[in-house]
Image (tube, rainbow, N blue to C red):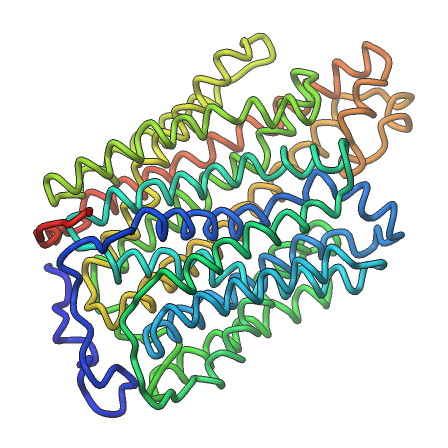
């Protein structure tokens, strides 16, 4: 069945829909001096994505200095939660008001949050600063991609979108490395101070050098939908983060959050079907391309990639005895893999106007990579692990921004921001739920394995599976250490095998993804 035509969605020129007095049109050429603007968009995208992971290696030092170990998880959760909630709002406001003002606001909010976090003298201000950062960071990631659609013709868009996907993958790997380096060589506060000059540079370039369509309209913002969405996302993320870790799955708090999340999602969908300017219009789900692209991104990129990125570095530390920095560096083949396929595929899509083969190939390669990771043993060389990590990156490079491009191409210019933000919104939720699910299964398997293999006199020296650290494991007596490493090996690698059906579903969805060829236009790259 073909994708729903644009006419089936709200008419961009219909009064009361909150669109421009003059309907937006697709750009016909790349504007002059676009290279400088593009560089600033890449910086903004990098900052927004980087701050999801940059504090992970700095957290032990941060909580020790600020005496806040009980609030440790919130330093990361506050950012991710705020960014996910903010994404749909930025997308909708960009469609209603024009993206330049919204983008500049996002940078300003992000920089303000960085100042608050960097200057924090206790955990409460730090968590608050991270939440403010997240509200800005979600806007940077979404609006950067939507601005490309405002400035670049559809046929040329792929070669600019592909490096953005590579930047996102780069940030997920480099973030922990950079955070650790700042902490070891200077001060953990540089995890936030570094955002100030880079954010100011991006702000100045875009403020004075970027010209975007303006939409002078009376905005009717969906406040009820935003509040319900925030409640639903908060409950969902907290259940995924706390369930099975800080609280048991049957704990009244987890059950209450789960029930609250279900109610909030139902009410949110009911509201979105009634208001004039829904923050996530239900009409986007009329597009088969949107539905399938979003599901592929949620499963393959959100669940699959983030689960691997989240747990493979610890695996390298535990099983191979690598330091945190070495484990981070060993994830760099993923970045190389992303770049090696994302950039060439972007140019190929721009030349041919066809994109469908890339998600198919990406689903195959990522699924193969995760299957191969499930076969790893303690005797395999680190080179072989790096090859598998490279394959994973190569598959993601074929997928990530191609899916966003497909979604943007199926919507009129006046709805591109909403469609882009909705696609990223569900991918972020998939990443949160997928990482939590993998962590829960892994922790359960590790606990059972330790209980069945460790002798009674070794159990006390090891402690619980939740308290295991690489330093503790490698300080154990040789025989006990061997048993623990073996338990870790047999607990994690089968989880990768459990993920392979997820990639199989992604492949099936990619095979039935419709292709709407990108419109041709003469690019002017002067």
- How many dots with numbers? 0
Q: As displayed, is residue 330 above or below residue 271?
A: above
Quadrant of the image for the N terminus?
A: bottom left
Q: Which residue: 72% across, 52% down? A: 73
Pick the front one: 427 or 110: 110
Q: Is residue 44 left or right of residue 239?
A: left
Indicate the quadrant where residue 60 lies.
top right
Q: Is residue 515 left or right of residue 472?
A: left
Q: Quadrant of residue 281?
A: bottom left
- Residue 118 x, y percent position in the rendering: 74, 55
Query: Can you give x and y, in whole percent of width and height, for residue 154 in the image?
Result: 17, 54
The residue lying at 56 percent from left, 14 percent from top is 377
At a point 74% along the width and 56% down the height, the residue shown is: 247
Q: Is residue 171 left or right of residue 7?
A: right
Q: Identify the residue shown where x is 17% and y is 35%.
A: 348
Reply above or below: 75 against 374.
below
Q: Percent position (x, y) of residue 427? A: 42, 54
Question: In the depicted view, which residue is nearer to us: 503 or 412?
Answer: 412
Seen from the viewer's position, the closer of residues 524 and 502 is 524
Taking depth in this image into account, of 376 and 366 the one nearest to the observer is 366
Q: Quadrant of residue 79?
A: bottom right
| Residue 368, above or below 167 | above
Residue 469 appears left or right of 395: right
Q: Position of residue 371 (x, y in %)?
A: 42, 26
């Amino acid at each position: 069945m073909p994708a729903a035509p644009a006419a089936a969605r709200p008419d961009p020129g219909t009064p009361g829909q909150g669109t421009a007095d003059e309907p937006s049109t697709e750009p016909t050429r790349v504007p002059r001096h676009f290279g400088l603007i593009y560089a600033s968009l890449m910086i903004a995208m990098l900052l927004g994505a980087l701050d999801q992971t940059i504090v992970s290696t700095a957290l032990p030092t941060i909580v020790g200095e600020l005496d806040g170990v009980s609030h440790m998880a919130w330093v990361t959760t506050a950012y991710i939660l705020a960014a996910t909630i903010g994404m749909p709002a930025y997308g909708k406001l960009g469609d209603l008001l024009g993206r330049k003002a919204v983008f500049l606001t996002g940078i300003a909010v992000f920089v303000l949050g960085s100042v608050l976090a960097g200057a924090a003298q206790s955990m409460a201000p730090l968590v608050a600063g991270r939440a403010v950062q997240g509200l800005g960071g979600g806007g940077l990631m979404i609006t950067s991609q939507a601005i490309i659609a405002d400035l670049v013709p559809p046929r040329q868009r792929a070669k600019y979108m592909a490096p953005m996907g590579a930047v996102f993958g780069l940030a997920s790997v480099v973030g922990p490395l950079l955070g650790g380096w700042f902490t070891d060589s200077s001060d953990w506060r540089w995890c936030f101070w570094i955002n100030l000059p880079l954010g100011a540079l991006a702000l100045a370039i875009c403020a004075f050098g970027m010209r975007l369509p303006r939409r002078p309209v009376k905005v009717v913002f969906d406040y009820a939908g935003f509040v319900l969405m925030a409640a639903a996302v908060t409950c969902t993320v907290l259940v995924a983060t706390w369930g099975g870790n800080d609280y048991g799955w049957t704990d009244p708090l987890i059950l209450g959050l789960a029930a609250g999340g279900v109610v909030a999602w139902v009410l949110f969908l009911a509201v979105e079907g009634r208001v004039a300017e829904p923050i996530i219009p239900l009409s986007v789900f009329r597009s088969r391309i949107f539905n399938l692209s979003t599901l592929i991104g949620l499963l393959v990129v959100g669940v699959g990639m983030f689960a691997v990125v989240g747990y493979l570095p610890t695996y390298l530390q535990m099983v191979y005895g690598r330091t945190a920095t070495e484990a981070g560096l060993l994830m760099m083949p993923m970045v190389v893999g992303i770049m090696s396929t994302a950039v060439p595929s972007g140019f190929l899509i721009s030349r041919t106007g066809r994109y469908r083969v890339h998600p198919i190939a990406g689903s195959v390669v990522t699924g193969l990579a995760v299957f191969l990771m499930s076969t790893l043993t303690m005797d395999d060389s680190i080179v072989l692990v790096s090859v598998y990590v490279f394959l994973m990156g190569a598959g993601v490079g074929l997928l990530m921004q191609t899916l966003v491009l497909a979604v943007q191409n199926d919507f009129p210019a006046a709805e591109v921001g909403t469609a882009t933000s909705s696609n990223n919104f569900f991918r972020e939720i998939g990443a949160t739920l997928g990482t939590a699910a993998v962590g829960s299964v892994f922790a359960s398997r590790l606990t059972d394995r330790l209980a069945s293999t460790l002798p009674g006199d070794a159990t006390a020296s090891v402690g619980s599976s939740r308290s295991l650290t690489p330093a503790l494991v490698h300080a154990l007596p040789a025989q006990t250490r061997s048993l623990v490493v073996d338990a870790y090996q047999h607990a994690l690698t089968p989880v990768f095998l459990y993920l392979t059906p997820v990639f199989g579903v992604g492949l099936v969805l990619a095979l039935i993804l419709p292709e709407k060829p990108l419109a041709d236009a003469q690019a002017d790259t002067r």
